Structures are given as structure tokens and as C-alpha cells.
């Protein structure tokens, strides 16, 4: 194990996520009494905002061939920088692009990588980052360490908060031009996805439903309630994948959307473990189910045992009444 | 068009449960199946073969029981299978697994495409595909929802968070597929019976010229320090009774917690 590796680095091609990683990275860097560095590959950023959000140092890459994400070039760029500066820790944003970059980069660097971590902390001697992740459909929580450096972890959106921008913060901004080989793949076309309603990942209130809703027409009850609380509508996987009542972007679960609202209403969702994993980040979970033994109740803050066809309209009314009097 | 398809055998995740009293994961009686997106990869390989001809080799690293997963891949239409099994492989992380798979692929030599699922149903690590592509120096396309072969090139559609991409790569290339790419077929009884007649090779570390330091626990770059069952730490306040009585109680509680906007 190399002792010379120093510093906490973060990277995400998604600026909002880079700020969140800087938030967590700042904590780790302070605990390790080391510098926090961010790698920014961007045509537009001058790096100042990254300093304001906690970076001590910014490596700025303005390569015109890297304006959009491509795994080969980004791997080349990060490999060159990591090999030169030898960071101890590297946090990568777990977007789909980040998740195809991190393992490839880790393999080139011959180092360990722990993807989709949910918690990071230092061990007692501050030698290792203990990286927690959830496996087996949410049933197990595993703590991993990397035997090699840098210790790479990927982190999804919404897990850590950015530190507020401080315009007086000082940091070093270094422009770099790492050598990039021509990419083996070529993006021929990109089509933006049409946004349907509120994005679940950003919603602070989510009203989600499952098989307990018996027919598509009954969705109106759910939608009315969502409207009453100002929430977004989500669903369980069978609703989107088998019944096609909602687009697949709307289903919540391990293989679908992972959400972190202030409150999550699970209406007629039994609580298969895949679903539960997707809602772990919710601050409050309210489950409405007529089966008192539904697994969802084990993982809920408020367990409403009752018929959703009665409970949901009553809730819609109560919300309208009570928020008026607030 | 010769295709290698990677298959992982996993526990049927929907049937896994935690025993709260013993705090263990209950795997007894839980079926072992092909990880869901790997099944899509097998299906896609078969569809490509039906159109362009060639040979499909299904590979799985795992315990001897993983042979069952390979048999299913053969029943779906793969021509040949390779089981990579050795007690030395136990404790492999994504890197060590990729080492073993890379050795097998290198031994097969003649292939144009490597297909796999974009995640495994048990670990959801998204690592083996890109790590393998890196070791074998192959271009990679992840999250593929459509694959089209155009002469010496492959064109794939990819599904990202906010956009869809159309990407082109030269061959050979590694592509990981999503569940949306196709609907895996159910093999016919004839196909299931035929599968047992198709060749299945079993390769150990020695067969793959792998040193014990490159694989398994010794070869792993990541170590699992501990593994605990996940039990909820939620409040579990039960509300039961008439809907018209429960509803205001719940809404008041949520307003008090500041969880509803209150406007």
C-alpha cells in the first residue's frame, strides 16, 4: 500500500452533483487534514464556483473534444491526472455516465472501486475510507474498503448536501491539458427525453401506488391526492413494466428511480425489497395498505391499515381542510 | 458474427427475505436464476444470430451450480457454454471477476461482440462490464436499448437519465444491455431438452493460466469488512380505524413534522 497518496478528489460531469460531492469531500479532506481537489471538464466553467463550494484546488480541462461525456477521453484525462498527483480518495458522481467511467478508470489504475455507496466515513486510524453499500435487493448493508489507492467511490445524487457558496473562499485554479487518445466510440445523435411532469428525483412529496389500485381509471384518486399535497406521482415496477399505466421513468425501486422526498406515500404497495431500496432516502414514509402484514409496514413511519379507496379520498379532503386552517 | 454473452447466476431477488430474529438473509429455498438483464443479453445475442448467423458462447463464472444458468442460456439459443469455476475464484471482487472473464475471452479469441447485462441483480455494482472491456482493450457501450449491426460497425441506442444517445463503435466491442431492449423468450420443451446435448466446457484457474494471486480473495482490490442485514429504523406508528378519522390525524402529524407544504 502506497503511503504517498494524498488528497481527496471529486469528479462529476454533472455540475449539481459535483457540488454535492464537494460537500462530502470537504468533510473527508478536513478530517484527513488534506486538500480537496475537483476535476472539472467543461467548456464554460472558470472554476470559481467550485472554489466557492469548498474546493482548494480545481483542475480545469477545456478540451473541445470532451465537451460532452465520452468514456474513453474522460478515462484518459482522469488517469493522467491521478497518475501525476496520486490522490488518496476519489469520489465520482454516480450518474449513468459516471457509473460507466468509474470502473473503467479503476481498472486502468488497477485500484478498487465501490459503486453506489450510501455512506462514507474514515476508520479509527484514518487509513481507510469505510464505504457502505446496499446489496441483495436492499437486504444487506456491506462495508467495503479498497486495498489500493486511490480509493474510488461513486455517489448518487441527493445523498450529500453542497456547502453554501462562499464568494470569499480562496482556491487554486489550474488549467490542464491531459493527452487524450481518439475515442473508440462516436455519438451519432442525442435526443433529449421529454420530461413528463415533475421529476421524481427532485420531488419533495411523492404519492406512489402499486397493485392495490385495481384499475387504470382509479388512478384519478391517486392523482387528486397528489394534486392536493402538491406531490409527484410515482408507482411500483409492475405498474410501469407490466401494466404500462405509467412510463418506466415513473417507477420507483432499485432498478428504477431512487428517490429522497420529505414524504413518500406508498398507496397499495406491498413493499417488495426492490421497491424499499428505492425509497430508503425518504425522510418520512407513509404506507397505506389493507393487509396489516404487508412488508411495507416494517419500513414505514406511518402505517395506515385500511382500504386505499376509502383512505386516499379522506386524506385528500383532510389536506384541503387542514391546510386552509394553517 | 460470433458473440460471447456473459451470464451471472443469482438468487431470485424478489424472494429474498431478512429474518429479523436471526438477522440473516434467508436464501434457503430461494431459486437461482439468470440475473435479469443478463437474460436480456442472451436474448439479444440470439436475435442477432438469427439475423446475421454465427456462434454464441455463453460464459459464467460461479459455483458448479451456475451450470444451470448456462443450461438455460443454451436452451434460449446459445450454441456453447463455458463454466468458469474454481474454489480459487471465491471471494472475487469486480476486478478479480473481470480478470477471470478476460482470461476466458482471450482463450476463445474469435469473437466480434461481448454482451452482458448492465447490472447484476444481486450486487448492482455496474462494474464487471467496463472493467472487462478495459482489460481486453475493447470499446464499451453501456445501457443499450437497441443494437444494430452495420457492416464492420455496431450502432446502439443508449438510455441515459435525460437523453437518448445513438452511439457507433467498431468491432469487437462490449455492450451492456438494459431490461428494455427486448422480452426474453421462454425456451420450448424441445429447446430445453436440446440444451443438454450442446457442449459445455468447464475451465479452472489452471485451464485459464491464472495465478492464485490474480483471482478470488487474493486478487480482489476491494475487501468486504462486514455485512449486516438491513432492518428498518422507521417509527412504525400504526393508524387503524375509520378512514375519516385516521385521515385528519395523519395529515396533522405530517403538517407538524413540516413534511407537507401547509398551503
Image (tube, rainbow, N blue to C red):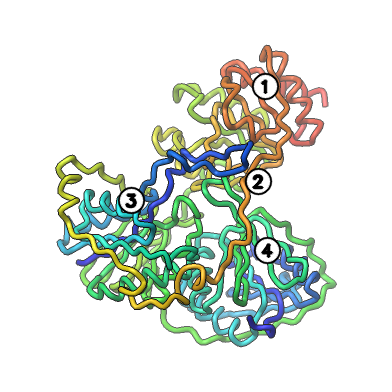
Q: Chain of mark 3?
A: B
Tell if the residue under mark 2 belongs to the same chain as the one under mark 1.
yes
Q: What residue does disc 4 label?
A: A130
Q: Nearer the viewer, mark 3 or mark 1?
A: 3
At mark 3, the secondary structure is helix
Q: Nearer the viewer, mark 4 or mark 1?
A: 4
- View extreme (right): residue: A168
Q: What residue does disc 1 label?
A: A315
Tell if the residue under mark 4 belongs to the same chain as the one under mark 1.
yes
Location of the C terminus of chain A (image quadrant): top right
Residue at x 80% of width, y 75% of height: A33
Q: What residue does disc 3 label?
A: B39
Measuring from the top left, give residue A176's x and y in whole percent: 61, 85
Disc nearer the start of the sequence (4/2):
4
Measuring from the top left, give residue B26's x and y in whole percent: 52, 41
Tell me the number on the disc at residue A54.
none
Amino acid at each position: 500500500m502506497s503511503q504517498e497518496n494524498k488528497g481527496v478528489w471529486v469528479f462529476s460531469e454533472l455540475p449539481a452533483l459535483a457540488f454535492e460531492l464537494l460537500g462530502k469531500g470537504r468533510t473527508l479532506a478536513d478530517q484527513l487534514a488534506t486538500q480537496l481537489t475537483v476535476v472539472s471538464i467543461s467548456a464554460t466553467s472558470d472554476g470559481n464556483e467550485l472554489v466557492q463550494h469548498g474546493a482548494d484546488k480545481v483542475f480545469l480541462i477545456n478540451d473541445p473534444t470532451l465537451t460532452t461525456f465520452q468514456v474513453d477521453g474522460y478515462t484518459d484525462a482522469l488517469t493522467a491526472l491521478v497518475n501525476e498527483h496520486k490522490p488518496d480518495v476519489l469520489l465520482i458522481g454516480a450518474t449513468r455516465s459516471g457509473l460507466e467511467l468509474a470502473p473503467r478508470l479503476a481498472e486502468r489504475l488497477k485500484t478498487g472501486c465501490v459503486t453506489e455507496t450510501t455512506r462514507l466515513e474514515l476508520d479509527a486510524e484514518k487509513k481507510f475510507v469505510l464505504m457502505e453499500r446496499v446489496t441483495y435487493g436492499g437486504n444487506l448493508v456491506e462495508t467495503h474498503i479498497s486495498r489500493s489507492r486511490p480509493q474510488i467511490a461513486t455517489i448518487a445524487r441527493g445523498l450529500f448536501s453542497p456547502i453554501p457558496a462562499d464568494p470569499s473562499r480562496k482556491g487554486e485554479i489550474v488549467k490542464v491539458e491531459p493527452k487524450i487518445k481518439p475515442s473508440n466510440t462516436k455519438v451519432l445523435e442525442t435526443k433529449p427525453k421529454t420530461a413528463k411532469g415533475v421529476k421524481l428525483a427532485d420531488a419533495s412529496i411523492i404519492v406512489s401506488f402499486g397493485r392495490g389500485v385495481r384499475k387504470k381509471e382509479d388512478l384519478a384518486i391517486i392523482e387528486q391526492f397528489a394534486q392536493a399535497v402538491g406531490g409527484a406521482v410515482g408507482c411500483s415496477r409492475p405498474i410501469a413494466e407490466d401494466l404500462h399505466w405509467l412510463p418506466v421513468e415513473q417507477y420507483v425501486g432499485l432498478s428504477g428511480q431512487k428517490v429522497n422526498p420529505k414524504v413518500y406515500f406508498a398507496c397499495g404497495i406491498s413493499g417488495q425489497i426492490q421497491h424499499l431500496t428505492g425509497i430508503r432516502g425518504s425522510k418520512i414514509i407513509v404506507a397505506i395498505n389493507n393487509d396489516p402484514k404487508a412488508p411495507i409496514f416494517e419500513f414505514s413511519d406511518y402505517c395506515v391499515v385500511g382500504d386505499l379507496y376509502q383512505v386516499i379520498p379522506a386524506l385528500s379532503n383532510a389536506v384541503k381542510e387542514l391546510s386552509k386552517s394553517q | 458474427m460470433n458473440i460471447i454473452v456473459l451470464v451471472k447466476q443469482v438468487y431470485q431477488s424478489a424472494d429474498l427475505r431478512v429474518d429479523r430474529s436471526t438477522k440473516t438473509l434467508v436464501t434457503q429455498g430461494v431459486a437461482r436464476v439468470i440475473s435479469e438483464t443478463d437474460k436480456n443479453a442472451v436474448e439479444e445475442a440470439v436475435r442477432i444470430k438469427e439475423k446475421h448467423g454465427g456462434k454464441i458462447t455463453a460464459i459464467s463464472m460461479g459455483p458448479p451450480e451456475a451450470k444451470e444458468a448456462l443450461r438455460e442460456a443454451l436452451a434460449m439459443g446459445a450454441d456453447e457454454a463455458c463454466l468458469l469455476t474454481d474454489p480459487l475464484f471465491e471471494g472475487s471482487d469486480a476486478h478479480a471477476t473481470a480478470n477471470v472473464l478476460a482470461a476466458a475471452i482471450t482463450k476463445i479469441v474469435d469473437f466480434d461482440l461481448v454482451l452482458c447485462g448492465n447490472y447484476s441483480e444481486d450486487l448492482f455494482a455496474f462494474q464487471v462490464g467496463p472493467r472487462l472491456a478495459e482489460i481486453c482493450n475493447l470499446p464499451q457501450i453501456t445501457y443499450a436499448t437497441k443494437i444494430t449491426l452495420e457492416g464492420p460497425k455496431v450502432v446502439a441506442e443508449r438510455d441515459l437519465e435525460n437523453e437518448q444517445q445513438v452511439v457507433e463503435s467498431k468491432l469487437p466491442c462490449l455492450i451492456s444491455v438494459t431490461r428494455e431492449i427486448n422480452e426474453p423468450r421462454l425456451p420450448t420443451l424441445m429447446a430445453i431438452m436440446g440444451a443438454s446435448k450442446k457442449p459445455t466446457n468447464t475451465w479452472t484457474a489452471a485451464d485459464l493460466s491464472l495465478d492464485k494471486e490474480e483471482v478470488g480473495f487474493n486478487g480482489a482490490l476491494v475487501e468486504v469488512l462486514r455485512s449486516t442485514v438491513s432492518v428498518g429504523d422507521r417509527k412504525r406508528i400504526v393508524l387503524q380505524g375509520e378512514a375519516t378519522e385516521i385521515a385528519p390525524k395523519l395529515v396533522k402529524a405530517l403538517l407538524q413534522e413540516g413534511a407537507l407544504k401547509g398551503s
